[in-house]
Amino acid sequence: LLHAAARCASDAVASTSRSVLIAGCLPPLGECYKAECVGDANEMVLTYSAICAELAPRVDLFLAETLTSSTEVIAARKAAGPSGKPFWASLTLKDECNAALRGGETVYAALAALKMKPPAAILFNCCAPQAVLAGVRAARAATR
């Protein structure tokens, strides 16, 4: 399935004259809105590593998305790292506009946990639009 998806993306890129990057998706490995259900960090690294190994020759970057905690981001980052490809992280926020991930960590704290290897891009998805502004402000403060 991963190969078929990458082949479809590659065919789409070939059909345009525009410069387009193909992102390899590193999805949530458990219930995506419940940080307590994400599982063991080492198991996540193993699963994400298997996905990365299959996708690395076929994609331009890795996008880990709908992540609820720094534990998930770190696991995905560790797995994608050996590929040498850019790593993007998309976090999902609580809807209270307090710049907190659904797992309870602040955006600032989650990104501080990644200081040694920060993502090439920080994104937000599957959250209220008004929560994103608080998340962007916190991400800006954490990455300065």
Image (cartoon, rainbow, N blue to C red):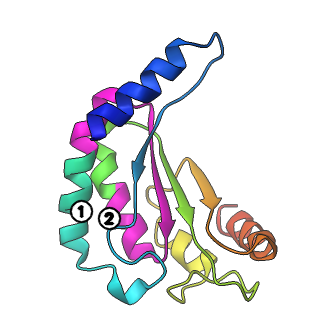
Q: Quadrant of residue 135?
A: bottom right
Q: Please state if 8 lies on the left or on the right of 37 as rendered.
A: right
Q: Nearer the viewer, residue 3 or 135?
A: 3
Quadrant (top left, top right, bottom left, bottom right) of the C terminus: bottom right
Dot label at residue 75: 2
Quadrant (top left, top right, bottom left, bottom right) of the N terminus: top left
Tags 1 and 2 in contact by the CB under 8 Å rule? yes
144, above or below 68, in the image: above
Q: Residue 98: where, in percent of width, then height? A: 73, 86
Q: Nearer the viewer, residue 26 or 106?
A: 26
122, above or below 15, in the image: below
Magenta stretch contains residue 134: no
Element under disc 1: helix
35, above or below 119, in the image: below
Q: Earlier in the sequence, mark 1 or mark 2?
A: 1
- Dot 2: within a 10 Å radius of its alpha carbon, few (fewer than 14), some, or many (20 or more) residues? many
Q: Please state if 18 lies on the left or on the right of 116 as rendered.
A: right
Which residue is at 49% across, 60% downward? 65
Q: Residue 38: where, in percent of width, then height? A: 33, 79
Q: Please state if 130 lies on the left or on the right of 65 as rendered.
A: right
Where are the magenta residues, as a range?
Answer: 52-77
What residue would you read off at disc 1?
Answer: 45
Q: Quadrant of residue 19?
A: top right
